[in-house]
Amino acid sequence: MVRFDNAGGQVWDRQVTNLDGDRSGYDDGARFVWWYQHHGRLASNGTDTAAYFGVAVTVANGGCVDIHQGDRMQVVDSDGNLADHPDAFAVGCSHSWTTRIAWNADRDEFGMVCATDNQCRIAVPAYTTVAAGECDGSLFGGDLVAVGDGYWTAWSQGGRARLEHFTDGPSDATVDTGADAAHPHLVAYGGDLLLAWESGDGMSAQVRDAGTGEAAGDPFDIGVPDHDYQAFKAYPDGSAAYPAAGDGTIRIARVMPPA
């Protein structure tokens, strides 16, 4: 994890895996980034910053080693030191992909969900089922948004985007959004939610009610290319922005607050 100041200068960097001079990737207990997915998410409570990401998991197997895939969450304080935080863990879900995290001020916690082939589901690590899925190659997590004392998460199965609301695990509300998307995006949008997904060469989006997950307006187009693993960012004015890369450039698409 690297922290920059507003001028782009590096303030500190902190390793959040556990390799050092005494532990390499093939040593028992190693937790490191290998050829598995190279992305994750950050979340902040205003002081500490949490990183939830995919890792390789090394375990001894007789005179050999086995290397599996899992995920890891570590918390770093404002000075760049690893924090002894109750939500952090060495390994949560395994196997794990599309790790998502959000700070929930009402619950005073970093909430997380993974997609996993452990019972083929969207789950809180490790493990409480949020939504049951199938391991057919089309199970993906979207994004996670804290709303009050619970969460909304977007996910997809068979190229169809869904929303799930939960608090401690099992979903208490499921919404079929009608969007054909393998990698849906979800972000807070004022007092509502904004669901977005790939559509042709661009993106489509729709406002969703934060209480029910139901549509709160018609879908509309966003004229920038989608990316499976990029994310929107919510802003205090109620807008949401997305960094879109294409043709060697980066454009910021901003969905302004509702009137």
Image: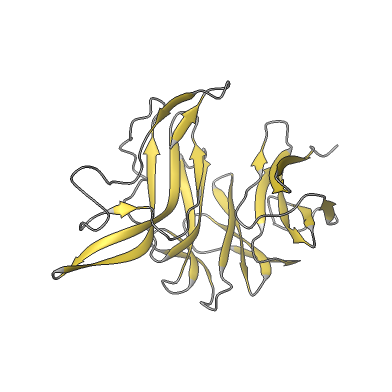
- Quarter of the picture containing the N terminus is top left
- Quarter of the picture containing the C terminus is top right
Q: Position of residue 89 (x, y in %)?
A: 33, 50
Q: Look at the picture and state if 38 lies above or below 178.
A: above
Q: Residue lying farthest left? A: 63
Q: Quadrant of residue 15?
A: top left
Instruction: Please state which of residues 131 and 43 is positioned toward the viewer in this rendering.
Output: 43
Q: Residue lying farthest front? A: 248
Q: Residue at x 21, y 56 (%)?
A: 27
Asked if residue 195 lies left or right of residue 78, the reply is right
Q: Is residue 89 visible?
A: yes
Q: Position of residue 71 (x, y in %)?
A: 40, 56
Q: Position of residue 102 (x, y in %)?
A: 52, 45
Q: Residue at x 74, y 37 (%)?
A: 239
Q: Look at the picture and state if 41 lies above or below 118.
A: above
Q: Look at the picture and state if 10 lies above or below 126.
A: above
Please name the colour scheme applied to the rendered image: secondary structure
Q: Is residue 189 visible?
A: no
Asked if residue 89 lies left or right of residue 236, the reply is left
Q: Quadrant of residue 189?
A: top right
Q: Position of residue 256 (x, y in %)?
A: 80, 38
Instruction: Please state which of residues 2 and 94 is positioned toward the viewer in this rendering.
Output: 2
Q: Residue lying farthest top? A: 7
Q: Residue at x 36, y 42 (%)?
A: 16
What is the total number of numbered labels drawn onto the structure image?
0
